[in-house]
Image (cartoon, rainbow, N blue to C red):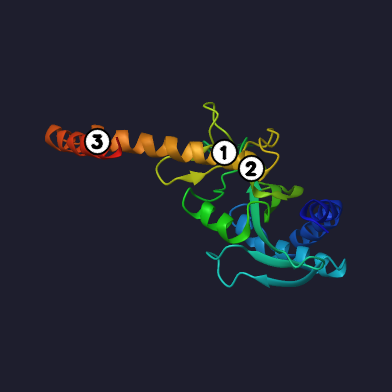
Amino acid sequence: MDNKNLQRTIESHLPQVQQEVERFVALNKCDYETFGKQVEDPAADILVKLLHQKGLIKSSRRATHKNEFPDLRVVEQWNGTPIAIDVKASNHSGMKAGLWAKNTSPANDLGTFKTLPEHVAEWGGENIYFLWVHYNFTDVKQEIVKVEFAPFYRFVGMNPEGLLKYRISDGKIRPRTYLQEPFFENFKEFKKVLERTDCHRSEKIILREYSALPLAHRRRIMESLSELNQEVA
């Protein structure tokens, strides 16, 4: 079974995963402040149990700590391909100016320009998936909106410049809004935009830092660049 078939099989059982997550909410003390982290372990447990029951995988391993990637490592039953599954969760409601309002976008980080290429080098661009739990929690309501399972790049957002949505300060890549359709159909498409965005971010950082330097330092940099350009020529 290739990845596409595995994905379709898991997608067909997502209603069952959602039911189990809803059962977890009903049986446990959950709240809007902590549920995003609280649901990660049970969601991974539910998915692993389902995959084993359906005979889709022959082994699985959970992350040993919160900073380890991925949350869940599984090996396919048929071809022995390792698959990385990271669990994400986002609230469709948020507190704004003391009142509850609908969130238009998840607040999650999807990796950085440093870590993402490292994960891809280890796992392959088509072997990294997100299990995404959408919930709508306030202080008076607890609702599981839906559960999604798809390759990681299908959750990535884009900005008006046609580049990946990201935060320039730390290079964290940001998700698309709840209403947007996925921007990428495959990893090849995503990789092209990732590389273009990484260069664009580097240029912005260089120009920002350069413009903040005293004139003498800027002159030294220009001299160094001139020497480098002569070497290249």
Residue beneath label 1, please? 192
Q: Is residue 90 visible?
A: yes
Q: Is residue 167 visible?
A: no
Q: Quadrant of the N terminus?
A: bottom right
At x 43%, y 38%, the residue is 199
Q: Nearer the viewer, residue 30 or 206?
A: 206
**Gap in angstroms between the C-alphas marked 2 and 1:** 7 Å
Query: Which one is in front in this view, the residue at disc 3 or the one at disc 2?
Result: 3
How many C-alpha atoms fall within 10 Å of the one at disc 3: few (<14), some, or many (≥20)? Answer: few
Q: Amino acid at mark 1?
A: Lys
Above or below, comparing residue 159 to residue 119 in the picture: above
Dot 3 or dot 1, earlier in sequence: 1
Q: Whole-percent x and y of residue 46?
A: 77, 65
Q: Whole-percent x and y of residue 72?
A: 66, 65
Query: Quick one: SS at disc 2?
Result: helix
Q: Amino acid at mark 3?
A: Gln
Q: Nearer the viewer, residue 21 or 153?
A: 153
How many C-alpha atoms fall within 10 Å of the one at disc 1: few (<14), some, or many (≥20)? Answer: few
**Gap in angstroms between the C-alphas marked 3 and 2:** 35 Å
Q: Determine whether label 2 and label 1 are within 8 Å by CB.
A: yes
Query: Quick one: SS at disc 1?
Result: helix
Query: Quick one: SS at disc 3?
Result: helix
In the image, 200: left or right of 6?
left
Q: Whole-percent x and y of residue 146?
A: 77, 47
Q: Nearer the viewer, residue 1 or 227?
A: 227
Residue beneath label 2, please? 188
Residue beneath label 3, please? 230
**Gap in angstroms between the C-alphas marked 3 and 1:** 29 Å
Quarter of the image for residue 181 reads top right
Above or below, comparing residue 135 to residue 210 in the picture: below
